Image (cartoon, rainbow, N blue to C red):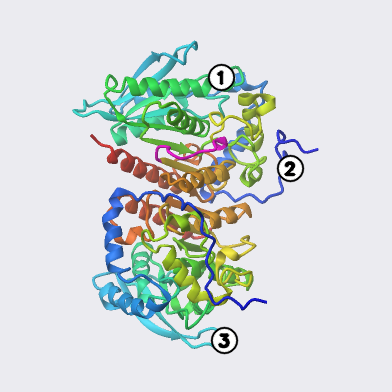
Amino acid sequence: MSEPSLAPYRAFEPDPRPVPVPYDPQLEPGLGSFLDLVERVPLRAHTIVENRAHFRTVIPDMASQAEGRGVVWEDRVVAGPAGSPDLEVTIVRPASVSGARRPGILGIHGGGYVLGTRFFATGDLIELAERHGTIGVAVEYRLAPEHPAPAAAEDCYAALAWMAGHADGLGIDPARLVVMGASAGGGLSAAVALMARDRGGPALAGQFLGCPMIDDRNDTVSSWQYDGIGAWDRNNNDAGWDACLGAARGTDAVSAYQAPSRATDLSGLAPAFIEVGSAEVFRDEAVDYAGRIWRTGGRAELHVWSGGYHGFGGFSPDAIVSRAAIEARESWWRRVLREQG
Amino acid sequence: MSDQNTPTAQGAPGIAPVPFDPELLPELEAIAAEAGPALTEENLPSIRVAASFPDAATATAGRPVTAEELSIPGPDGAPDLEVTVFRPSAQSPTPLPILVNFHGGGMIVGHRSWEHSRIVDLVERHGAVGVNVEYRLAPEHPFPAGVEDNYAATCWVAEHAEELGGDPARVIVMGGSAGGGFAAAVALMSRDRGGPAIAGQLLLCPMIDNTNSSVSSRQYDGIGTWQRDANLLAWRCVLGPELAYSADAPAYAAPSRAEDLSGLPPAFIEAGAAEMFRDENTEYAGRIWATGGEAELHVWSGGCHGFDIYAPDTELARAALASRDSWLRRVLGRSRP
């Protein structure tokens, strides 16, 4: 018998590599800024610590994020999953709260499951509080590789359970709880939605999956189109999934809570909003996930923006495509937050 | 016995459909209650006559848009084509983009007047020239009559762009449902035949897959707008009994049959999540991207086929229109003279 391989999982390489979809020309300056500011050091197993330190300098603290905005915020510590440490959360509320119960949003930050803090998710919660009067909770979940998957998803689920269990005190309408996140935060949101279904609650009114990172196999056409190209290219993606899953990566041992694309049953989930760029690694896995939800009779909305790089809205906010993406999101929020009659 | 020309699961729903958006339900109920003559081949003449829509003068009344009826050459050996040309009333110092529209109706019913108001809106919002094309319908005129008419019209428009006040570098082909299928086919034909340069293809819930084999084609069997039976009838009328649902059907009839989707103009593809064409539309976008081509895809949650036409005053329809407008601004802005 041969020795077990110590080499990490890698998908079979197509030859030739598929031609990438070009970027929207209006997005190219923003992509340059993204690469200069966020991905100064390529993410690899040995650069995770360095990238974390850098990431922290990129994200403004809560006081600066909230300054001049129509919100109030507070930090709290809440119970983690059974047998695991407590969780730090930041609660973001509209500054003027009426007596009415507000929708509650669990905001889950991105960063490839290995980077970032909850303050990478609070920007969206501030926007939503201002525009829709929502009460947001950003959760500090455990990162890989120190805490392999599904530790992060369990932390996020625990935060959701805390929100539902404390809805009265928080002023949240428990019938309008939504999970949201982008990139790894989108993957964790999808995982939390699966857990909420399988564990009989909390009931979710929606799951917002921005360019979600959900498939550890990294073997779609789009994952090969962005090999060494663009924001969060396939090599970064390999580094993130290696950290999450170690030797189990790419095997049948990977569970749906670790990588939601692995779920064999996508029926009975909360209505999904799935958004992705056509010019990024996650395009095909996002489209596949939406398609599999629909084929079960489930509700999902899918937007694939032409020429969009990973996270294009954040670094190219004034491009026409970015403004349209915000409009489409806003429309979904209006629909999903409608009070049920 | 399995026959590739027999669509699976005909008349046998059993796959839970994606539910409709709640805001669409009153309109869907009203449509179901109207229940005109069943869509059968025998009823096509009466259905065609029964649906009447405003003519061009009515569609432009009170709008800063003019309308002109033209007769242009059809394909070689075929009759001339009637088209309606819409233009902004104000003279433009620069050539305008041109939208060439093919109406919906399953390739078996419909008239360009059905979509005059959609085109007038776009002409007004985008400062474009709109050309709304009348093509021949099946089964009287089966494939390739309709698509050759639409290709001939597109060639004529490109050649006469300047007379129309338009910019030949910014010709967009567009349509909804059958019209979206025609627009996709015209884009393929123009690529393959070295025809006019097309700046974009705007495909609204396009009818492109004759096999009726997707999950969504079975989810809307007996429910919704444009149901499975109608689609089966339409493809049989267009392709005849032999090729109706066959994987060997020609690509210019059913663009999903095209083996190569590379080198096409940028595509905008929109569908409802709660309609037959959802899966074929999503697949078409995916196959364009896989070649490195440009496509934008929007699948609106709970949208029925043609939701923006049936229920324009809804959150869903307004959002879908905003996305279309955004794409048109992007694709037209890139090649502005």
Chain letter belonging to callout 3: A
Residue B160 lies, with reference to residue B95, above or below; the image says above
Task: Specify which label sits upstream in the sequence, 2 or 1.
Answer: 2
The kind of residue tagged 3 is Ala
Residue drawn at x 28%, y 58% is A30
> Does mark 3 fall on the same chain as mark 2?
no
x and y, in percent, of residue A62 in the image: 30, 77
Numbered badge on residue B7: none
The answer to which image quadrant residue B30 occupies is top right
Q: Is mark 3 on a helix, strand or loop?
A: loop
x and y, in percent, of residue B128 in the image: 30, 31
Q: Magenta stretch?
A: B256-266
Chain letter belonging to callout 1: B
The kind of residue tagged 2 is Ala
- The answer to whether marks 3 and 1 mark residues whose Cβ atoms lie closer than 8 Å is no
Q: How far apart are marks 2 and 3 (CA)?
A: 47 Å
Residue A154 lies, with reference to residue B58, above or below; the image says below
Q: Which residue position holds label 3?
A: A82
Residue drawn at x 38%, y 70% is A98
x and y, in percent, of residue A263 in the image: 61, 65
The kind of residue tagged 1 is Val
Q: What element carries label 1?
A: helix
Q: Which residue position holds label 1?
A: B49
Q: Which residue position holds label 2?
A: B12
Residue A136 lies, with reference to residue B151, above or below; the image says below
Task: Say which of A301 and B252 sits in front.
Answer: B252
- Evaluate whether residue B57 shows in this view: no
> Does mark 1 fall on the same chain as mark 2?
yes
Residue drawn at x 63%, y 60% is A267
Task: Say which of A280 and B57 sits in front.
Answer: A280
Main SS of residues in magenta: loop
Task: Say which of B257 and B49 sits in front.
Answer: B257
